[in-house]
Amino acid sequence: HFSASDVLTGEVGAEALAGKIVLVGGSAAGTHDFHTTPYGPLVPGVEVHANLMENVLQGDYLVRPDWFRILDLLMILGSGLLLALVSRFFKAYASLLLLGAGIAGYLGVDYYLFTQKGLWVNSVYPVFTQLFVYTGITVYRFAFEERQKRFIKTAFSQYLAPTVVDRLVDNPSLLKLGGERRVMTAFFSDVAGFSSISEKLSPEELVELLNDYLTEMTDILLKYEGTVDKFEGDAIIAFFGAPLDFQDHAERACLASLEMQERLRALRQEWHGQGRQELFARIGLNTGPMVVGNMGSRTRMDYTMMGDSVNLASRLEGVNKQYQTAILISQFTYEKVR
């Protein structure tokens, strides 16, 4: 570039312009002769003409072969599919970082080809495709994960400890609802002589007493992260070792049973002082392979257990009556905790 005033005053010698094609134009802001180009938003019109003339003289044109259309299509499909696959294995934040790195890398290659090789690769559609795919996947995952979290909280908050529910919400892969065979410890408890007790109390007194008892016992079960299967009148059916796979499920079940009996002794003292009916509970435990999962009809399902090992725990609870004991465990459970 030479200033026109320098040429007219002779500060720029004739030899600097000899044999050259000279274009005269203005670059002052007031001339309004500015144009937007890939190299900048405000390029004087005279420079646009100069670049055009150089391209003609040098044969150095911006090239976009016909097969680049196929390349554009492949880049759109490839980038979208790649991002979709990557998003399956990474969380949203990690996917966002990968998306940013991918777009930056793609634009860097595109800029290099454009400035150094004179090749024009369409960067708009692939970039917007990646943004669109990422947004769609993120929205879908958010909706799916929120629905899954609501389901887990609704399905398990009634018979699992809050800490266990939180762990399942954070890592739903720990939960296998379809049914699986797993070694667990089954828990059965029953109130001794409850039928005769119920005949002595009014319905209101019976319900109040039973609710107090079940609340205290359930709190202890949940303390040791047991799963309450169901209540059948005065009976409590629970298990340890699902949905979270604890290796010490037998020990947890034994500790919970001991604490429940200890708490029940304290409750009997309280009830005696209040003139209320006292309760005695029998507990049976067995450890072994069981089937656990969501079972039921299409409209109502329970997360429950079944199998011979479950039946043995139920029988052990009943055998307490013959031996005048409060807790009976099987040989299988004993082998786990001795």
Image: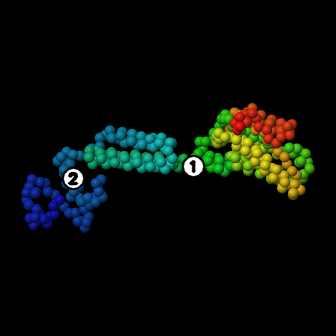
Considering depth in this image, is 198 or 101 the residue closer to the camera?
198
The residue type indicated by label 1 comes to Ala
- Give the residue number, with chain letter if any, for mark 1: 143
Tag in front: 1 or 2 = 1
Q: Measuring from the top left, give residue 11's x and y in whole percent.
A: 10, 64
Considering depth in this image, is 137 or 248 the residue closer to the camera?
248
* Quarter of the figure with the N terminus: bottom left
Q: Measuring from the top left, give residue 169's x and y in whole percent.
A: 61, 48
- Please give the name of the residue rendered at 39% of the width and 39% of the height, measured from the top-left corner: 74
- Residue 51 is labelled as 2
Query: Does residue 1 show up?
Result: yes
Q: Measuring from the top left, give residue 139's x and y in whole percent.
A: 53, 49
- Please give the name of the residue rendered at 13% of the width and 54% of the height, measured from the top-left corner: 21
Considering depth in this image, is 131 or 212 the residue closer to the camera?
212
- Please give the name of the residue rendered at 68% of the width and 40% of the height, measured from the top-left corner: 249
Residues at marks 1 and 2 touching, judged by CB atoms closer than 8 Å: no
